Amino acid sequence: MAVIHLTDLEAAINFWRARRPSPDGVAIAPELAALAEVYALLALRRAAQVDEAALSAAARAAWLAWYDTTPDTPCIAICSTAQGDDVCKGCGRTFDEVQHWPSLTPAEKRHVWWRITSDGVAWRFNRYAERAAGQAGPWRE
């Protein structure tokens, strides 16, 4: 099951708020309405993530439009999995995640991004942070 984390929904909502602000302070763009419905259901259920398959077509389209503005891969061109590590010291992904990255869905990729960002121990977050500085991400607003 591919899930979308609450922080990604918030980032997508903020993306659409900036891109299509309310003309009168009351009305919201259709993309915002679709994402807000998902967000409200998460709040009601006190959940932190939603199954990607549970999104309406409008919410999925709005989320994917935001997703297309994010960096695809956390790679910083220092891959220790090539030297046998189970988890890459450079980006924080597991060997399987590195190997199968091209075939992961957007929600699966964002789940990996969420995990490595939460962990914050990969070199992309400390030792080689300057390599990642040009990339936007969920940890930077």
Image: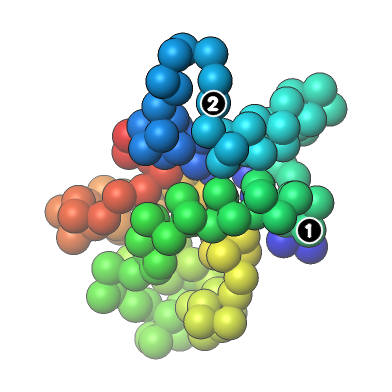
Q: Quadrant of the N terminus?
A: bottom right
User: Within the image, what quadrant is residue 35 found in?
Assistant: top right
SS of the residue under disc 2:
loop
Note whether 140 is above or below 1 in the view shown: above
Q: Amino acid at mark 2?
A: Ile
Q: Where residue 96 sits in the image (x, y, percent)?
A: 58, 79
Viewer-side residue, 22 vs 9: 22
- Amino acid carrying label 1: it is Ala
Is 36 left, or right, of 55 in this rendering?
Answer: left
Can residue 46 be seen in this snapshot? no
Q: Quadrant of residue 60?
A: bottom right
> Does dot 1 land on a helix, a strand or a loop?
helix
Q: Residue at x 78, y 58 (%)?
A: 53
Q: Which image quadrant: the C terminus?
A: top left
Mark with earlier residue (1, 2): 2
Where is mark 1, residue-wise? 53
Q: Furthest residue to the top?
A: 25
- Image position, residue 127 (x, y; %): 22, 54
Q: Residue at x 46, y 50 (%)?
A: 66
| Mark 1 and mark 2: Cα distance apart in space | 24 Å
In the image: residue 99, left or right of residue 41 = left
- Please name the residue shown 43% across and 80% down the image: 81
Q: Position of residue 11 (x, y in %)?
A: 47, 38
Image mark for residue 42:
none
Confirm whether residue 141 shows in the render. yes
From the viewer's perspective, is 53 left or right of 127?
Answer: right
Q: How many marks?
A: 2
Residue bearing the label numbered 2: 28
